[in-house]
Amino acid sequence: MKRWAIALAAVAAVVALPSLWNGFVYDDVPIIVENSLVHQLGAWNAWQLSYWPAGGLYRPLTLQLFSLEWAVGGGRPLVFHVGSLLLFAFTTFLVCRLAARLLPVAGAIVAGALFAVHPVHVEAVASAVGQSELLSAAFALLAVDRYLAWRDTGELTAGRRALLAGYTLLGIAAKETGYIIPFLLAAAELCRLRPNRRGVAGVFAWQAVTVVSALLVRLIVLGSLAGETASASFQGLSVGQRTLGMLLVVPEWVRLLIWPARLQAEYGPPGLPLDAPFGLAHAPGIMLLAASLALVLWSWRRQRTVAFAALWTGIALLPVSNLLTAAGLVLGERTLFLPSVGVVLLLGAAGAALWNTLPTGAPALRVTIAGLAVMFLLAAGIRSMARHRVWRSEERFFAQIVRDAPRSYRAHLLASRYLYGTRQYREAEAAARTALALYQNDPRVHEQLGQILRVQGRCAEALPVLSDGVARFPDGTIVRSRLIECALAVGDTSRARLVAEAAVALGFLEFESTLKRLSPPAPEPPQIR
């Protein structure tokens, strides 16, 4: 392999160096620190249990890696972050290798360099749980690169078809996005057609068997093919309404993948009004999707590498678009790690085309453009290195999340939860009140503010907040429980009983014991003398 690819992998490692001083932050805590499964060397039970304690995700390979890192480092975050750094460097090397197969040398170097310094990658590398993104992307790159190599030489033997299926299976075991690997292979086949098609049918037969087998295992282990609990922003929305919401997210995808000057760990309403009626706000998303389709159609006969890169981006975005199923996130920067491969290939192709148009007799112009490109890459690398420090500690992370996304109610809600856990009740209350003012359609906001007021002995203030939560979300059992607790705290037993009766009438049988406890004792029968 060319030395420049190794050098760019080293650049990626240097960019990620600040992450080595990070602790366990946000999702790292429930999935790694508080997960006893990860604390067992081997963690074979990872293949029989859900990734999240609450269920919905199946990532046994990632949990297996976490258990190994926990054993090696005794639970120290440094080992996890070293693992993430090495995975990022390896993935960058794989991007360079794929780019070298598809692009001229100049374009491949541009693509690899952009991938190494891209700020949108920071979230996947800076947090320990981002290793699921890194692993899945690595297996996708391995599969596509090997397929292209063996496809072009006509050497898709039975053993190699099985190895490609193995890459797909490992990608799926790392993260659910691994299910798109067969579609990436199909895009490669469509865009890199060669006369010798021997073995191609066998490849996709193996891929189909692999995907079906993985789905069956998931069904057996989790009891369902459904994903994680949908974000409150998507609950109750139809597929059509989610599609309209996705159109508002499309410009954010493009901005983050092309010009990520502003980064944030939370995206959502009201900053992104996902339930907004169709109107002018959706026009940018429609135009960007139309332009992407036009690019694929234009490049299909002229430059199939460009078509492949565009298809890669679209295929990789589909699982995180909330179209197929509502996910737990509206948008997450770490979920753009795999789609960014297609984008850097596109930019690499554009860079190579631009370079070829420069007159050979104007060396000064070439040097100037090359210098500007290096300065741009250097600025992006510095931006990424600075961003890694946001994950240094939970205190820094949750303070930054609000500064980055003041119009995201979830940013304030998450900050409130952290502050409540550290007994900073005044700050936690302020954050919860801001979240509630921004967005009222998530029962957890009502629960959070009500609980903060309750633990401070201010149940009289909590009652209207919790009552509003129950009125908006009759199925919310936690907010209903909090309301009963506060009603009892102020001596309003009849109100507590009415809330419990309504819960039992709705079918929540867990409130039967509460209702029985609150109901007045039956009168004793009169004694006969």
Image (cartoon, helix red, strand yellow):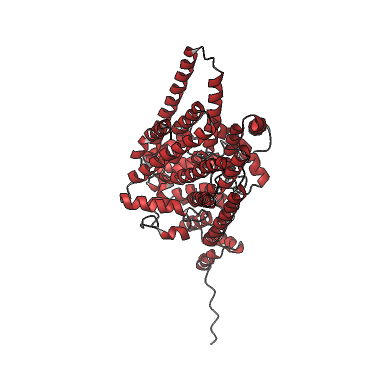
Please name the residue shown 50% across and 67% down the image: 517
Q: Position of residue 143 (x, y in %)?
A: 52, 45
Whether residue 381 is visible here, answered yes or no, is yes
Q: Position of residue 215 (x, y in %)?
A: 56, 56
Up the image or down, 444 lies above or below 518; here it is above
Up the image or down, 39 lies above or below 247; here it is below
Please name the residue shown 47% across and 12% down the image: 364
How many numbered discs? Answer: 0
**The quadrant where residue 251 appears:** top right
Pick whichever, 408 or 207, lies toward us.
Answer: 207
**The quadrant where residue 394 appears:** top left
Please name the residue shown 52% across and 35% down the image: 101
Q: Position of residue 440 (x, y in %)?
A: 56, 44
- Give the quarter of the figure containing the N terminus: top left
Q: Position of residue 335 (x, y in %)?
A: 51, 41
Up the image or down, 446 lies above or below 502; here it is above
Pick whichever, 213 or 415, lies toward us.
Answer: 213
**The quadrant where residue 126 appears:** top left
Pick whichever, 65 or 408, lies toward us.
Answer: 65
Whether residue 455 is visible here, answered yes or no, is no
Find the residue positioned furthest to the bottom.
529
